[in-house]
């Protein structure tokens, strides 16, 4: 619990109290964690990967995001008090920690910092979605691809410890 950013503002004793309410469950690759219409509470990925998607009218699947350990999902249904509008599936095997809606309602009331952390996360996702929508609808494919490659190169250089602006080598076959 201490590694999950959502609980960073909660002291150790209270994290133990929250952990007592957590139900941890293993899921096999392709197994549904929650479906459209469910009330999933909060789902925190402990290990593995979880794919969150939505089914389109034409029957195709639209990938919304891929969750890694310490990421959480279900907050949209939790905060809106509505059923889930997406599907979460283990991809590959995953262990997921779940907190019920009633427990989360109580914890969010008892720990305002946790509520603020959740809201910041939701706001960040909303901002990223709005930016992505703007890019898709307002710019050419060539422009978007170029910007993506530059951003990917900058991220790779940063991860490799390169000095910003020192250049980038694109390997070509």
Image (spheres, grey):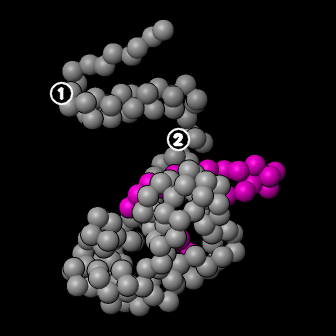
Among all residues in the image, which is located at the extreme left?
A: 163
Displayed quadrant of residue 142? top right
Displayed quadrant of residue 28? bottom right
Residue 129 makes an appearance in the image: no
User: Going by the image, does 63 lie left or right of 103?
Assistant: right
* Camera-side residue of 14 and 138: 14
User: Where does residue 82 sit, x and y in percent of width and height?
Assistant: 62, 80
Please tell me whether residue 48 is drawn above or below residue 15 in the rendered image: above
Q: Residues within 10 Å of mark 2 (few under 14, many from 20)?
A: some
Q: Which element type, helix, strand or loop, lies under badge 2?
A: helix
Q: Which residue is mark 1?
A: 163
Mark 2–mark 1 Cα distance, whole angstroms, equals: 28 Å
Residue 145 falls inside the magenta stretch: no
Circle 2 or circle 1, nearest the eye? 1
Q: Which residue is mark 2?
A: 135
At horizontal 58% and vertical 29% (from top left) the residue drawn is: 141
User: Where does residue 36 sit, x and y in percent of width and height?
Assistant: 69, 69
Residues shaded magenta = 50-78
Q: Which element type, helix, strand or loop, lies under badge 1?
A: loop
* Camera-side residue of 158 and 33: 33
Among all residues in the image, which is located at the extreme right?
A: 58
At horizontal 53% and vertical 78% (from top left) the residue drawn is: 41
Residue 96 makes an appearance in the image: yes
* Camera-side residue of 145 and 134: 145
For the N terminus, give its image quadrant: bottom left
Q: Residues within 10 Å of mark 1 (few under 14, many from 20)?
A: few
User: Where does residue 31 sit, x and y in percent of width and height?
Assistant: 65, 60
Residue 76 falls inside the magenta stretch: yes
User: Where does residue 19 sit, x and y in percent of width and height?
Assistant: 36, 80
């Amino acid at each position: 619990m201490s590694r999950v950013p959502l609980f960073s503002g909660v002291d150790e004793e209270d994290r133990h109290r929250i952990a007592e309410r957590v139900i941890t469950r293993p899921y096999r690759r392709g197994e549904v964690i929650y479906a459209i219409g469910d009330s999933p509470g909060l789902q925190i990925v402990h290990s593995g990967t979880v794919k969150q998607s939505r089914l389109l009218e034409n029957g195709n699947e639209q990938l919304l995001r891929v969750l890694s350990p310490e990421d959480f999902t279900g907050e949209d249904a939790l905060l809106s008090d509505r059923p889930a509008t997406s599907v979460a599936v283990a991809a590959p095997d995953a262990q997921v920690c779940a907190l019920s809606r009633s427990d989360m309602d109580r914890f969010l009331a008892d720990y305002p910092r946790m509520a603020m952390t959740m809201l910041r996360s939701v706001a960040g996702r909303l901002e990223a979605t709005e930016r992505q929508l703007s890019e898709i609808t307002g710019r050419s494919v060539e422009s978007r691809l170029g910007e993506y490659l530059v951003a990917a190169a900058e991220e790779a250089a940063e991860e490799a410890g390169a000095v910003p602006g020192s250049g980038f080598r694109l390997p070509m076959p």
